[in-house]
Image: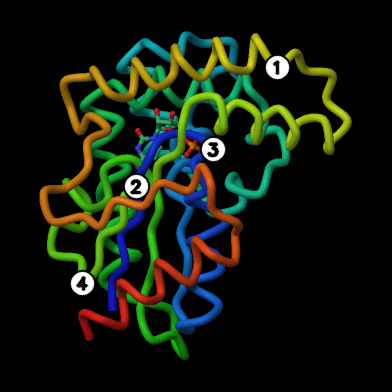
Amino acid sequence: MIIAIDGPAAAGKGTLARALADRLNLAYLDTGLLYRATGHAVLRAGGDPADPVTAEAAARALSPADLDDPDLRTEAAAAAASAVAALPAVRAALLDVQRAFAARPPAGRDGVVLDGRDIGTVVCPEADHKLFITATLETRARRRFLELRDKGVDAIESSVLHDMVDRDARDSSRRVAPLVPAADAFVLDTSDLSVHDALAAALAYVRKRQ
Ligand code: C5P
């Protein structure tokens, strides 16, 4: 079974993907981490994340251990991720990694769930189930702000919101693999849903179609 989950930043994709993976015995890949690790590697080497040659080399050099770095969760890594994500050569390099994961779930798992921006449209258009998770801009900015505060990061809610507007605009307007719901995706707005209710709605969608 392949479940594709897409949507904008802080809509609740990761939480939902992990919960679905747990319930349905699936392996989970957070594809945003691949873009974050690529952007972060370029920054660490003193390069420009918007430079296609440097960024493609960083994407091709990624190893699984690079995805465990806690610095990938910073807003600087998110911005660098969004810059490298606009480059076709980077997307092509990371496409192979994502498709290989989807094609061969680890032993003992019944399938995979991938979350990102283009899973249902580009990476796994043949996915058995596609969810597009969204929430209002204010809800998403609030969630990200509280997340940062819980981690002890000194953030300002209005600038978190501002960064999110920029990133949404870049992700939605880029020419390759822009953030759009697949035509056959189930769109779920989590603005007024608890984690429990969002999971129940997603499970109901998956089960109805089996
Ligand atoms: O989901 P997350 O916020 O970790 O993603 C970071 C950035 O990586 C996104 O803003 C987007 O630019 C890029 N991304 C992408 N395609 C994916 C996953 C992430 O372009 N499948």
Q: Which residue is mark 4?
A: 128
Q: Is residue 81 above or below residue 27?
A: above
The kind of residue tagged 1 is Glu
Q: Quadrant of the C terminus?
A: bottom left
Q: Which residue is mark 1?
A: 157
**Mark toward the start of the polypeptide (1 vs 2):** 2
The kind of residue tagged 3 is Ala
Q: Is residue 67 above or below residue 100?
A: above
Pointer 2 residue Cβ closer than 8 Å to ligand 1: yes
The kind of residue tagged 2 is Asp
The secondary structure type at the circle numbered 3 is: loop
* Residue 66 screen position, x and y as percent: 59, 44
The secondary structure type at the circle numbered 2 is: strand
As drawn, the residue found furthest toward the front would be 192
The secondary structure type at the circle numbered 1 is: helix
**Cα–Cα gap, marks 4 and 3:** 24 Å
**Cα–Cα gap, marks 3 and 2:** 11 Å
* Residue 53 screen position, x and y as percent: 32, 17
The secondary structure type at the circle numbered 4 is: loop
173 to the left or right of 105: left
Q: Which residue is mark 3?
A: 10
**Mark toward the start of the polypeptide (3 vs 1):** 3
14 to the left or right of 6: right
User: Disc 1 vs disc 2: which is toward the camera?
Assistant: 1
